[in-house]
Image: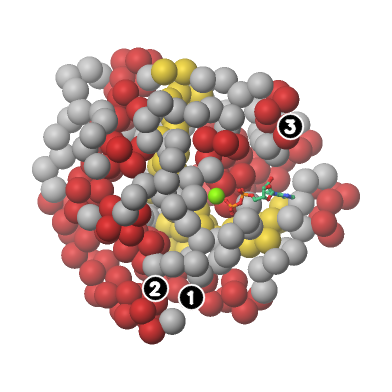
Amino acid sequence: MERLEAALDKARHSRESIQTDKKSDAVRPLSAAGTTELWQQLKEFKISSRAARSNRITTLTNNKLSSPYDLLRSRVLRLMRENKWHTLAITSPNVACGKTTVCANLAISLSRQPDTRVLVIDLDLRRPSLHRILSYRPNHSFHEVLEGKVQAEDQLVRFGDNLAFGLNNKPARNPSELLQSKQCQTKLAQVQAAFKPDIVIFDLPPMMVGDDNVAFLPTVDAGLLVSAADSTTVAQVDTCEKEMAEMTNPLGVVLNKCRYFQEDSSYGNDFY
Ligand SMILES: Nc1ncnc2c1ncn2[C@@H]1O[C@H](COP(=O)(O)OP(=O)(O)O)[C@@H](O)[C@H]1O
Ligand SMILES: [Mg+2]
């Protein structure tokens, strides 16, 4: 706990300098290709309806099961546009709250808006799972892009025209150090400069499990907290919301796995 408090303190003080650093960093383009060409050149993958069903991906089409995510999408888009925010971190108090499931569905729902380019990066580098939920195992991991071992354009995969994912096929060896490194911020800035996504979503580790997020949350524009009705306590949500507010702009809390809403929404998510 003491370690977490010290890290939080450090994050609070370093937030401003990180934001200034990000602005002043010289961002080198990844290649001479234009943005549209870069997107088109990315390897494309599809999700079968069977995989979608078993992994709770409900947003491939506009239907009754996609509506909670479509509602979340509209709120996220409105707030991000109003505030000119581009980067959103998704985290939760503890494990298995449904963060990665929400991340994938929100991204697919956003990408059904043809004028919105979305990039999703799996930064849960200890337990990456976005590739499993999407049923796509990449040859290389996105953490290898951050480490400078692989080019982003060879690693990112495209789903449809305007959604790309940076997935991992295995955990990183030194997740904390990697997320805290200047190289990580520089690489992410380069990827964003080249692909020009309207929104970048980061799937982060849970907040109460380690301090990986403490270094990273201050670098994003906004954060969304996913809680699970069956396992997260009100006190945990409260603590994490406060901690998040110290580090970035809290966008809200998703109440996931909420059986009470099942009859109305048929899925079990609510947002506030
Ligand atoms: N709304 C929901 N209702 C029931 N189960 C869910 C819901 N959302 C996610 N899950 C399940 O909970 C488990 C953990 O989900 P995941 O997205 O991997 O969580 P996290 O990324 O927070 O660890 C998975 O088995 C997933 O299918
Ligand atoms: Mg996850």
Q: How far apart in space, not on screen, are marks 3 and 2 (Cα)? A: 37 Å
Secondary structure beneath dot 3 equals helix
Disc 1 Cβ-to-ligand 1 distance below 8 Å:
no
Q: Dot 1, crowdedness within 10 Å: few (<14), some or many (≥20)?
A: few
Q: Amino acid at mark 1?
A: Lys
Q: Does residue 252 appear anywhere in the picture?
A: no
Q: How far apart in space, not on screen, are marks 1 and 3 (Cα)? A: 35 Å
Q: Residue at x 38, y 15 (%)?
A: 40
Q: Identify the residue position indicated by label 1 in the image.
A: 242
Q: Amino acid at mark 3?
A: Arg
Q: Earlier in the sequence, mark 1 or mark 3?
A: 3
The numbered dot on residue 246 is: 2
Q: Dot 2, crowdedness within 10 Å: few (<14), some or many (≥20)?
A: some
* Residues under numbered marks 1 and 3 in contact, where contact means CB atoms less than 8 Å apart: no
Q: Identify the residue position indicated by label 3 in the image.
A: 53
Horizontal arrangement in the rendering, residue 36 relative to residue 102 (left or right): left
Q: How far apart in space, not on screen, are marks 2 and 1 (Cα)? A: 7 Å
| Residue situated in front as seen by the camera: 146 or 197 | 146
As drawn, which residue projects farthest toward the front? Answer: 173
The x, y position of residue 135, in whole percent, is 59, 29
Above or below, 208 against 255 in this view is below
The x, y position of residue 209, in whole percent, is 49, 67
Q: How many marks?
A: 3
Q: Residue at x 61, y 44 (%)?
A: 101
| Residue situated in front as seen by the camera: 17 or 203 | 203
The x, y position of residue 107, in whole percent, is 53, 38
Horizontal arrangement in the rendering, residue 210 relative to residue 229 (left or right): left
* Residues under numbered marks 2 and 1 in contact, where contact means CB atoms less than 8 Å apart: yes
As drawn, which residue projects farthest toward the right? Answer: 263
Picture quarter with the C terminus: bottom right
